[in-house]
Amino acid sequence: MQLQESCLEDLEGNGVEALESLRSEEPIKINNEDSKLTTVSGRVFSCQGKNVKIKIPLTNPSRTFSAISYLINQSSSKKYGPDGGNKLQISKKKLSHAEKMIKGALTELFKGLNYLKTYRNLNILAFMNILKKFDKVTGKQILPIYLKVVESSYFNISDKVMILSDEVEEWFIKHFAGENRRKAMKYLKPHHRKESHSVTFFIGLFTGCFVALLAGYIIVAHLTGMYRQHSENTFYMETAYPVLSMFGLLFLHLFLYGCNIFMWRKARINYSFIFELGSKNELKYRDVFLICTASMTAIAGVMFVHLSLLAKGYSFRQVQVIPGLLLLGFLLILICPLNIFYKSSRYRLISVIRNIVFSPLYKVVMLDFFMADQLCSQVPMLRNLEYIACYYITGSYATQDYGYCMRVKYYRDLAYAVSFLPYYWRAMQCARRWFDEGETSHLVNLGKYVSAMLAAGTKVAYEKERSIGWLCLVVAMSSVATIYQLYWDFVKDWGLLQHNSNNPWLRNQLMLRQKSIYYFSMVLNLVLRLAWLQTVLHSSFEHVDYRVTGLFLAALEVIRRGQWNFYRLENEHLNNAGKFRAVKTVPLPFREVDEED
């Protein structure tokens, strides 16, 4: 106990914070006699003759700055009690943080012990089935002989796992559940939400409503000629249509994510573990479809009413606030603090977006860079969002000056910057992963996003000045970026094109039975990657506004990303098992260092 208090005092005096992240790496080993801090990732302290290793994680900006500040100024004063003694003072916040860590560690330990018991039972059952099959084929009776040896083995008769599991359960009930076993089991054995038939019913109901409203919207738009090329209703296409196209791309992406979840479950890909989704914030594919259908029904309904009012003779000044209120309503639902509309999932999404925006200050996990890749396919949606925000925030809707945001240089430059931001965020994530893991492949991946930014920059310059020189540069840069991206898609992200594979030009392990699906997906990915040719050809549908053509091409990119998601997670699932990373670790604030350290 004295050793523990003394060590805690040393830790408190040096301002070392505990680690909360479940995805951190193993502590770095340091061999120096005076225990000086040689890296911002770890330190060895000497405490009453014993070495204690401290992990200083760079998981978020506050911890990053704290670790760097501590590296610059290693000496910090110890905290004393109010009586001037040497009694250690620990804040309630740190006690609560330590309690949360220990609770998480016990939960993971209990889960791992249950996995170990299941592993033992499955091995015994598999051994019996193999012997039964052998006896049936050979006509011999060796099952009783071998089974007698296996059943008496230590692997089968040892009860240490069950005893330890019972002890963990007792500790948790005593110290964290107030002797309430039911409360403890909610943490140790969380129950998954049961899928309700009412969800399926409402999916069908909202789907029918959306189809009807969309059909009515298309009919009214055709009668009024809103989407015709060189239409007189330019004001509608500049102010209201971006709202519809933005929501259309967003929920098309979400719908494809629901399809991905369905296919991942069917192919037995453990997406929830890879994304570290808890039982509270994990969305089933039915939940995703319900969100999509309900949201698109509301959007189609509001836009149908808006267009109908215009067709009846209402002026734009009277109804132009409706699209802005629709966008504001969805933003309020996203940040709503009430426990409604999938609160845990909404807040998890907000936290992931925060991690992306502040890259590279946050430690990068799978869900972060997976979401950042999705944003790379949603550049048109982000540009529409930026324009709509500018239109309503600057008050242009009051003066009906829809061209204000495109005339002012500040907002025009901001619109171009939005086109680069997803690639910049992804590049910074690659840089952070290289810094944390030291693998040069992350730097090569960073080069892919740099090439995408250069290609996007040449396209912007070509749109400003349509000269033959800029056109050649667009073709050259876009071709290099496309080849770079295709190589990374097929070889790195999907793990295909292995010439020594048992499956020609695929990989040894495939989750889908039909090999032709992989070849078709590669060809489709190649075709959809060439959408940048629209910048050069400027092709458009007859008598259709160019904005509609742009929406169609943006939707194709979203569809490409949807199929990319499946194979990316399939490859991650196979590598996750192959690299023995299928275990979550919960590192504690400190541990004793071995003699060899």
Image (cartoon, helix red, strand yellow):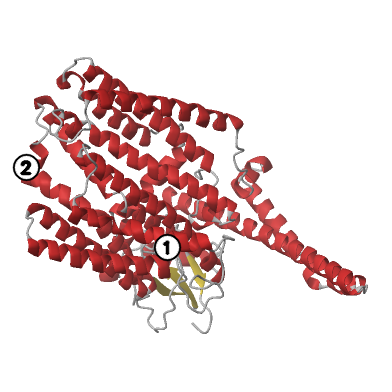
Q: Nearer the viewer, mark 2 or mark 1?
A: 1
Residue depicted at 30% across the width and 49% down the height: 378
Mark 1 Cα within 10 Å, few/some/many (few <14, many 20+)? many
Placement of 407 over or under 80, stated as above or below: above
Relative to the observer, which residue lies in front, 592 or 301? 301
Give residue 347's position: percent from left, percent from top: 40, 42
Placement of 51 over or under 63, stated as above or below: below
Left or right: residue 307 versus residue 110 is left
**In what element is the residue under mark 2?**
loop
Q: CA distance from mark 2 to mark 1?
A: 43 Å
Relative to the observer, which residue lies in front, 459 or 187? 459
Residue located beneath label 2 in the image:
408
User: Is residue 80 shown to the viewer in this render?
Assistant: no
What amino acid is labelled 1 in the image?
Met
* Quadrant, the N terminus: bottom right
User: Is residue 591 shown to the viewer in this render?
Assistant: yes
Residue depicted at 28% across the width and 61% down the height: 65
Q: Are marks 2 and 1 in contact (CB under 8 Å)?
A: no
Q: Which mark is residue 522?
A: 1
Give residue 207's position: percent from left, percent from top: 47, 30
Residue at the extreme front: 542
Residue depicted at 43% across the width and 30% down the height: 294
What amino acid is labelled 2 in the image?
Val
